[in-house]
Amino acid sequence: MRHVSLRILFSLLLALTFTACDSDGDDGDGNGNGNADDGEFNSTLGGDLDGSFSGNAFFAVVEDESYPGGRAFVLLLTDADFGSGDTQFTQYISFVRFSGLPGEGNYNLADVEDGEPDIEGATYGIYVSLSGQTASQFLSSQSGSLTITESSSNGVRGSFNFEGIGFDTSNNQEVNGSISGSFAAMPLSDDVIFVPSP
């Protein structure tokens, strides 16, 4: 599952290098409370993770025959400043649902540690922090939910919370953490999405 999760995540990061430079703006209040501005998100970290961060919010529906149902809705939240090229230390939250564009509703997150959620409609969340090009922390969902309050091809808005387990490469320790926040994601252009083979 981590292999699939990171493959989808980094595929979208590649797409972002071509599109996110047009999405500069304020980063919101960064406290994970309330509603995010269009194209932005706010989040708060807990447990072994600490602090808060905010930034750009994007979504896409990626078609790939290897996914359950042949497609995946991907919500990507990042504090990376692609416009300036400064991505030496960045954080990402990503949600993947094996479906087309989801409607309004509450979607329970799969426990990735129990095995790959390989059925159509399964939803999971991951958190990654990068130092340079190396993942320094990785967290995958064990429980939680993704709540969508508005959904169209022009934008997806809602909130999230999840608890998860992962790993910190700086000290080779297991990480237990929680993440919550809100988002107002804008679409990524279909013609820049690239998903490499497994």
Image (tube, rainbow, N blue to C red):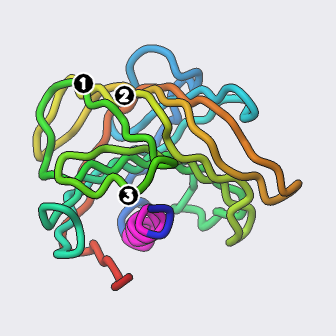
Rendered view: 41 above or below 81? above
Q: Which residue is mark 3?
A: 22
Q: Mark 1 and mark 2 in contact (Cβ < 8 Å)? A: yes
Quarter-of-image position of residue 160: top left
Give the residue displayed 71% in from the left and 69% down from the top.
134
With 125 as the anchor, is 38 left or right in this view? left
155 relative position to 45: left or right = left
SS class of the residue under badge 2? Answer: strand
Q: Which mark is residue 145?
A: 2
Q: Mark 1 Cα within 10 Å, few/some/many (few <14, many 20+)?
A: some
Q: Earlier in the sequence, mark 2 or mark 1?
A: 1
Magenta region, residue range:
4-16
Q: Position of residue 186 (x, y in %)?
A: 27, 46
Q: Is 56 placed left or right of 87 in the picture?
A: left
The location of residue 64, given as percent across then percent down, is: 20, 73
Q: Is residue 101 left or right of residue 34?
A: left
Quarter placement of the C terminus = bottom left
19 vs 109: above or below: below
**In the image, what residue type sits under mark 3?**
Asp
Q: Secondary structure at mark 1?
A: strand
